Amino acid sequence: MAAAEEVENQRPSSAGSVDDDSVDTIVDEFAPFLPDGTEPTLYRTISRRSEAGDLPPHDKDVELAKKRQAQQVPSNGVYATISVLLLGVFVAQVDASLVLATYGKVASEFGDLDSGSWLLSAFILAQCVANCLYGKLSDIYGRKHCLQAAYVLFALGTAGTGLGQSMKQVIAWRAVQGCGSAGMTSMVSIIITDMVPLHEVATIRSYVNILQTSGRSCGGVIGGALTYSLGWRWAFLVQVPPTILSIVLVHSRLHLPRRESSGHTQWQKLKRVDFVGAIFLCATIFTICFILETGGRQFPWKGPTIISMAVGAAIALAGFVISAHVVAEPIFPLRLLKVWAVLSNYLIALLQVLLQFSLMTIVPLYFQVTNKANTAQAGAYLIPAFAGNTIGGLASGYFIKRTGLYKPMTVISPLFAVLCMFLCYFFWNGHTTVWESLYILPGGLASGMVSSSIFVGLAAGVPEGDLAITASGLFLFFNLGAVAGASAGAAVYQTSIRAGLSMALDGVTDGPEIMRKALSDISYVQNASDKIRDLFLPAYVYGLHQVNLQSIVCAAICFGIAVFTPQRRLKR
């Protein structure tokens, strides 16, 4: 017994060791739960994770907690830095709509009008492909370097487009432009999330949304004016100076904290890039977007081009899945799709943009036929939707900042979309007044609200290390929704019009020829006699209503998903 006691006395004391006598003390109901010596250490750990108001008044960590909370309030310098980034966002969005007013002139100059639509398609396809790469590359090489690379690509693509000597050259440079544009928008949102606390992100995102909407709204006007006065080449070349200015401002004014990989050599960074997965993922996205963009319009759905693209998409997708399970750092980790916060917000983004673009692509055509509006007048009918987009973004940002809740905005937005579609379905019947044209405003509200709320929901649902990749994926789904919406809306509209005209012209002399002209030339419908127009109008109204019904179905699915999205209250 004496020997045993001697050994026990020689045992080194530590905060975690408990002798035999203390066991009896621990089971006593009045004893502390933690052994002597460990409580202060554990308490220090807990207190550093607490708010200052949760700590005892004289606790030594009160000042530390207050300092941490103060750092979460964006400073004027942060807002000044973000304002620099917004210039690039505006330029990218102006270009996205500017080409709508110029591609006809470009194609006509090269005597290749049939290829004119590829000036749009090449840009969109490249944008979709590049979106998914910026997130992971910015984790490896840094946010600032990736943003500067995006600006350089956009500047080179813009200059190349303006100086192109053939249609193929112009289309190729438009693809380079698309790669740069993808980073100019997605990287800004990622950097904003790095710089400001989460409850402020929605507010800043609403400002970005205003710049995006303004750029898209005036891009067509700027492009048309420049093309008319100086020629189409200058419509692109004038974008180069502000892009170069953005590069200079970002280099001198954007100061971000160094990331963990900043101390690695270039070879170590290069080895982290999943080139195989990136190739397979880009091929998958390209083939899917190609099918959505050209199927049924430039190539028949059952033709060899679309079928071969579908097979290629399946093979590329299988290759990407296998690669993602093998490599250590996949370009897009598939495990993120198992996170409901990620998957649900991706699906909401896809469906919301799809239903909105389905309507937006049809509205100008509807007013050109029913009200004999010219191109500029028809485009003006979209202004209420753009205004609603701005108002919705600001309202969503303010609500999230004040309440710390983002899910209500996500749930409400599909209801506004349904309201928009019902109003169009019941009141747009071929003789739409100016006041009735405002019925698309709720649709714009829905888009503006959800673009802010789902970004915050996504950021709140993933670890900080996965934020850049998931944010890039969100912008990919935005673009996929736009491509799918334009394709689906046009397909439903054209199919419905064809069916309506077939019934209306049944038994009419030269009916097939009249229908062919009506489907191929909008000016033929505008200049037709009142008797012929009375036959046409019900078919075009029917086509619009079918698009409305398609959008209502998408909104209903979107609402069902939104109800079950996760929510956690953000600290304010």
Image (cartoon, helix red, strand yellow):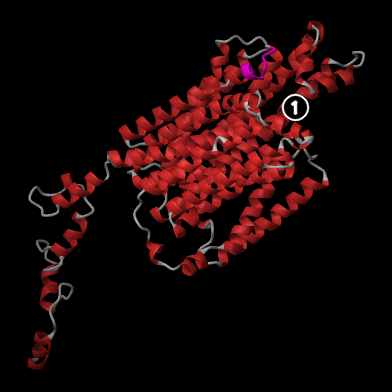
Q: Note whether residue 2 is visible.
A: yes
Q: Pinpoint residue 1: horizontal percent, then vertical percent.
A: 9, 91
Q: How many marks?
A: 1
Q: Pinpoint residue 505: horizontal percent, then vertical percent.
A: 85, 16
Neighbourhood count class around disc 1 (C-alpha, 10 Å): few under 14, some 14–19, many 20 upward: some
Q: For the view shown, which residue lies furthest in the right direction?
A: 509
Determine whether 75 is above or below 133 in the image: above
Which quarter of the rendered picture does the C terminus lie within?
top left
Of 160 and 446, the residue lying toward us: 160
Q: For the view shown, which residue lies furthest in the top direction?
A: 530
What's the magenta region? 372-378
Q: For the view shown, which residue lies furthest in the bottom direction?
A: 3
Query: Residue tagged by mark 1?
Result: 494
What SS does tag 1 mark? helix
Residue 507 horizontal side relative to residue 495, left or right: right
Residue at 14 percent across and 68 percent down: it is 35
Q: Note whether residue 569 is visible.
A: no
Determine whether 546 is above or below 24 in the image: above
Of 205 and 21, the residue lying toward us: 205
User: Which image quarter: residue 378?
Assistant: top right
Which amino acid is tagged 1? Gln
Residue 150 horizontal side relative to residue 86, left or right: right
Of 260 and 519, the residue lying toward us: 260
Residue at 74 percent across and 34 percent down: it is 107
Residue at 63 percent across and 58 percent down: it is 279
Q: Pinpoint residue 245: horizontal percent, then vertical percent.
A: 46, 41
Q: Pinpoint residue 105: horizontal percent, then vertical percent.
A: 71, 30
For residue 155: magenta? no
Residue 43 horizontal side relative to residue 327, left or right: left
